[in-house]
Amino acid sequence: MNPKLTRRRFIKGVIASGAAAASTSLWYSVSGQNRPAGSVERLLSINVNGQVRRVDVSPQETLAHTLRYKLGLTGTKLGCNRGECGSCTVLADDVNIYACSTLTHEVKNKAVLTVEGLRAADGTLHPVQAAFIEELSPQCGFCTSGQIMSAVALLNTNPRPTREEARQALSGNLCRCGAYDHYLNGVMRASGQLS
Amino acid sequence: MTFMHIGKDFTPPDVEGKVTGTARYAEDFRRDGMVFARLLTSPIPSGRVVSIDASEALAMPGVVGIFTADDLPPSAPPANPALAKDFITYVGQPILAVAAESEEIAEAAIERIAIEFERRPFVVDPLDTLVEGGPDPYPMGNTLIREGAAAAAGTTASGTAVGSIKWTRDQIASFRAGRFPTGAPWGEEWAYGDVDANFAQCTTVIEEPFVTIGLPHHSLESRTGMAYWENGKCYFHGSLQSQTVGHAQLARMVDVDPANLVFINENTGGGFGSKIFPYPMMAVTGRFAKALNRPLQLRITRADEFYIGSARSGMQGWIKVGLRDNGRVGAVDIAIIGDAGSGGGASGSSAAEHVSIMYQPEAMRYRGMSLYTNTTPRGAQRGPGQNEMAAVLSPIMDKAGRQAGLDLVELRRINAPGPDALIGPRQGTISSSYYPQAIDQAAELFGWEAKKALPRQISATKVRGIGVGEGYHSAGASGYDGLLRIAPDGKIHLHTGVGNLGTYSYAAVLRAAAETLQCSWENCVIEHGHGENHLPHSTYQGGSNTIFTETRSSHVAALDAIRKMKQIAAADFGGAVDDYSIGGERVFLSSDNSKGYTYAEVAQKAIELGGEYSGQVFAEDLNDTTKRSVQAMQGTGLIAAAKDTLPKTGTTPGFAVAMVEIELDTETGKFDILDYTGIAECGTIIHPKGLRQAMNGGGVWGFGMAAYERHVYDPQNGLPANVGLYQAKPPTYLDVPLHMKSGATDMPDPQSPVGSRGIGEPSQGCAVAALMSAISDALDGHLFNRTPVTADMILNHIAQNDFNTGDLKTNTF
């Protein structure tokens, strides 16, 4: 045993793994909450991308789940499903939120905007989308929808941000490919500060 | 050379889908009747499954089945099984899968499964198993042994087994203290030159220990597979870096004839080496779907991605370096114990090879071994071996350079690998190198001399540091197939079996074919990402390998097309084949360009002629995958398919050099990167924006390795303590510089038809090395001898409390 191992450190390790097994031979039942399988759904009307969508939603259902699996809006990605990465970022009444950490029932009176709703009616790309193409901002693309939605939220309130302001505004969006410089270039281009 | 397409930016066809949300990844596909599978993973680090009671789970409404190791072909250690039974070797190892009508039901069902485990001893630090009497990660030992004869005789499946290697307590104590362990046995070793004689001629000799700690890939897309079977065919939506090179392997894993496997993978949410080839859980997806006779999706969680998404191996090592009077590295002696986790391999020899190429020592010796631990399995991660070596090597070389009175950039110039450089134990040649020019370019762009003259003390609590580092990886192969089709409408369909990792190189390499055919890019159609798009046997997408390898195969396919077009034209208009030229998407008589065909017309002619012109006949040396694709397209146009047999000698290198300026806060131990400059030496630039992405993305990975990312295990219980993204700590926007500068030498490699090589791996190595060098510089040359160097370590050093930087422990806290 590591002599420096304290009780506190041990508990931290156990919490991090989500499981503890303590005996040489044991019956183990996988830990976790016993969630009801198939709780009662309610029919909700949600404003998504300017359209009222009627959908059955269970009480514990996240907005990401509703968008992806019930409304077919798979542009919203799930990178962690626990509020760490920002891939699921959408706007609710123009505020960027993590859809994986928002219950769908919480947005029933709000206007939800996803990456699929950014194009103009004539099909023209949103300036952020066009700028991200011009700057070749995405790499693998899995985080891109979230990056775009955070950028849109920023530019809605601050049309000409500094690069530092843009960095702060997008800092809740992880990019494992490390394309941060290119996303920031995209934001600056979309705001007309890069030509 | 003036190019039409090479060296010019273009918009890859998949970018718009990524910014509009229409790009589809494996999890975005649904199928009528699809069921959802989830994994039950091990809560213990070592042991075996005694029994499984799933009766309660299987009785739940909506649960459709369970899949265990008994449903898979048997595997023996050290193979990494898709599902474990007799050998559980890490926390998080998959034990079984449950399928249900929804993921929620599958998860609830898993919670009702009772498993009886038998625990075994475990170990998380390689030195703890290496010591005599120490616990072993497998019942039969702690290290990989190769049994070539047994494999040849068919008595082992893989030719590998688990054996045991041990050191005495004195040897372990010596190694932990930073000294070479006299008389200790090693798993592998190589040398060239007279090491001892060369050390005797060196005037500066230093010895240092070092540690690099493994870290997870944490690709942002948690790996997902969806499979369904129809009429004997398996359709598999997966997430891989490569498309066709793993086809036969995946077919074996899901037990189907390769001709009946359709692999679909248009987009991949990150891989970084962990998805180059099919991985074990894909066997569960395909076989479970077949067993249930229903479409099945298996998506893993973020925590599962930490456990089974692969990780970089760590190193515990010792190095001795000698400099001659003139600054040349005279000799290097290096010893590396590699942490292979519970499976996979360590990268010690690759790490040593990095030293041999980047500093060209006149004599060198490497001794190493790969040890298993009860931590997550390890695999290739962006420059495995080379990049972690670059990280710890740079400040050590700085120390030697300072002792010799050399400027740190000058030290690199003196030892830089030029075109006559030699590499590795066999001292093989390389295809070309302009690396010395890259150093000069970086020094100028960064302003090395000016920054060197700046005061180190910025304010009462802020100090400046500047550093330089180098990255290397082999960057190209040969022998793969190129395939294209010119359709009767004149469209040129460029087929590639390269995967779409996000680097856009899958598209960029096809521009070599457009270049050779002298056709407009707008008239080209890229065919990729779907087995039914009839793809050739292409290289794996990884290891900085794609650009060199696939520009060659694209080029040879285009040459095959030109040959066929000229033959058709010569037959109809007279004269010899060599009398014909191409241009403006026409093939014509050079002396009278009115006599000729457009590409559309010649495609129609090819269909009429049949035979080799439209795919009824093809070269025997093509790979079976390519042959099947040619056969599937026969009669639809002019079909060109060829294997790359162009001359290739020596190692194809990719080099990069970086320089970093930091401002370090002595009150917090944190630092900001004020300037980052990276210069690639990757031959001719093929795609400028793609190159910037590679350099900057690799730079961010370098910052992560230098300062943030590492495995942490609880040594008492073998439990990982930083499973989540926020704990494993990939860099965020706030951890990287506000601007990043990059460039390239842009000089051609003679063995590529367009002069280009790859750079994905060296881009990380140079960044981590430069940042480590800068941190050391800011602290008056202090060596931490490890990665990552975290803020608390810096603060402890400033407080003269060096307890956490003085030994070789790894994976623990």
Image (cartoon, coloured by chain):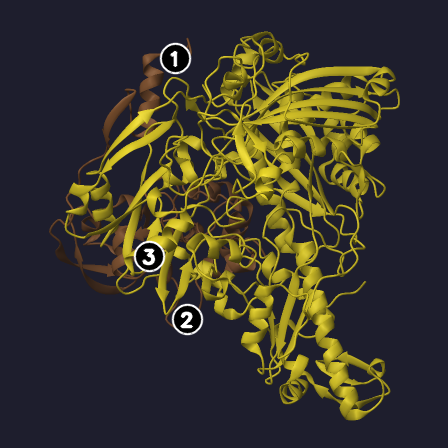
Packing grade of label 2 (10 A; few <14, some 14-19, many >=20) is few
Chain given the colour brown: A
Residue at image point 32% right, 15% down: A8
Separation (CA) of disc 2 from disc 3: 39 Å
State the quadrant of the N terminus of chain B: bottom right
- Regarding mark 2 in the picture, which secondary structure is present there? loop
Per the rendering, the mark at residue A5 is 1
Tag 3 subunit: B
Q: Position of residue B468 (x, y in %)?
A: 70, 31
Residue nearest the observer in this picture, B806 or B305: B305
Packing grade of label 1 (10 A; few <14, some 14-19, many >=20) is few
Tag 1 subunit: A
Mark nearest the camera among 2 and 1 is 1
Residue at image point 50% right, 29% down: B708
- Regarding mark 1 in the picture, which secondary structure is present there? loop
Q: Colour of chain B?
A: yellow
- Label 2: which residue? A123
Mark yes or no: residue B525 visible: no
